[in-house]
Amino acid sequence: MSSAYFDNQLLQIPLAENNNHTILLFDASQLQVDELTLTQFLSPFELSVIARRKTPQAKQEYVATRLLLKYLVKSVLPSSSNITLDKISSEFNQQTSKLELNINNNFVCSCCVSHSHGLVGVALNINNSLFGFDIEKISLKRPFEKLAKHFYDAAEVALITKQPCTASKAATFFRLWTLKEALAKATSRPIAQLLSPNVFCELGNSQLSATSTALTNDINEQFDISVVAKKSTDWRCSFISFSALSSQLAFK
């Protein structure tokens, strides 16, 4: 039923010049938001959003995801080379339930973002295809078995409980979670509709595929990431350093 979705590995590769079909990953804690002149980097709409973010981590994650999206725009769309960053704006489309980038009021493309405990990821969906991804920190402290029994399909619960140790049970729980979240984003469905159905059956019914992998940040925290798409093997993920991001977007 599920082994293929645990064996299908999302490739993690070094940062490349061509970042099409790349999920860009970044440690948002490296950003000192108060030291940035945000009007240079964010659109008026994005500035209105960041003003409503209350915690330092929420501000870091929001600004980081928007900087990463603009980095990708500059990397993937050569025609955007002379467009200033404040003319690239991310807004949620209520009709399609998709996050979209409006580039200089001239071109709109779908995009996807995810964040968990400071690790953020973004991707452009230039072709507006069915695509979604999700990142979650793997926590051994959360009552994941209790949560699974309350929310998940019985076969999924059995898959978790048969694991030989707590770490394996947690990894399985969060793999299922990222698959469900990624599928929800790809199909524009509320996550509440996908918690109890078997995610492997739902992927099959949607005629979508999935790849996943485990990630480790600089302080050895473990995360899980899953991609859902028509052809998920087209996608890969890459970490970008603060220096590479700041050099491209001209901030320090």
Image (cartoon, rainbow, N blue to C red):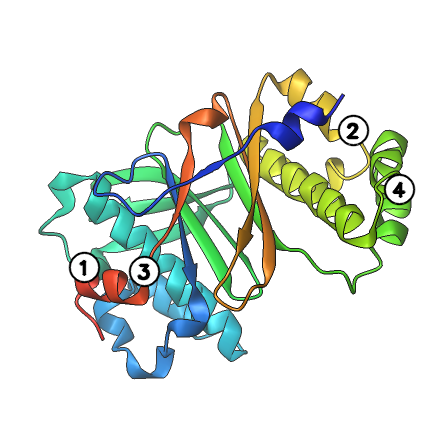
Q: Residue at x 46, y 26 (%)?
A: 233
Give the distance between the C-alpha atoms of the residues marked 3 and 2, in whole angstroms: 36 Å
Seen in the picture, residue 103 relative to 18 is either above or below; the reply is below
Q: Residue at x 83, y 39 (%)?
A: 152
Look at the image and tell me in which quarter the N terminus lies. Answer: top right
Give the distance between the C-alpha atoms of the residues marked 2 and 1, in whole angstroms: 42 Å
Q: Amino acid at mark 3?
A: Leu
Give me the disc on residue 198. 2
Quarter-of-image position of residue 48: bottom left
Mark 4 highlights which residue? 161
Q: Give the percent coordinates (x, y) of residue 22.
A: 36, 39
Give the distance between the C-alpha atoms of the residues marked 3 and 4, in whole angstroms: 40 Å
Q: Earlier in the sequence, mark 3 or mark 2?
A: 3
Q: Residue at x 54, y 78 (%)?
A: 55
Q: Give the percent coordinates (x, y) of residue 25.
A: 42, 53
Work out which residue is located at the far front of the displayed protein and give it: 164
Q: Amino acid at mark 1?
A: Gln
Work out which residue is located at the far bottom of the displayed protein and give it: 34
Q: Secondary structure at mark 4?
A: helix
Look at the image and tell me in which quarter the C terminus lies. Answer: bottom left
Mark 1 highlights which residue? 248
Q: In front: 124, or 241?
A: 241
Quarter-of-image position of residue 30: bottom left
Q: Earlier in the sequence, mark 1 or mark 3?
A: 3
| Label 4 Cα crowd, 10 Å radius (few <14 / some 14-19 / many 20+) | some
Give the distance between the C-alpha atoms of the residues marked 1 and 3, in whole angstroms: 10 Å
Q: Secondary structure at mark 2?
A: loop
Give the foreground label among 2 and 4.
4
Give me the disc on residue 67. 3
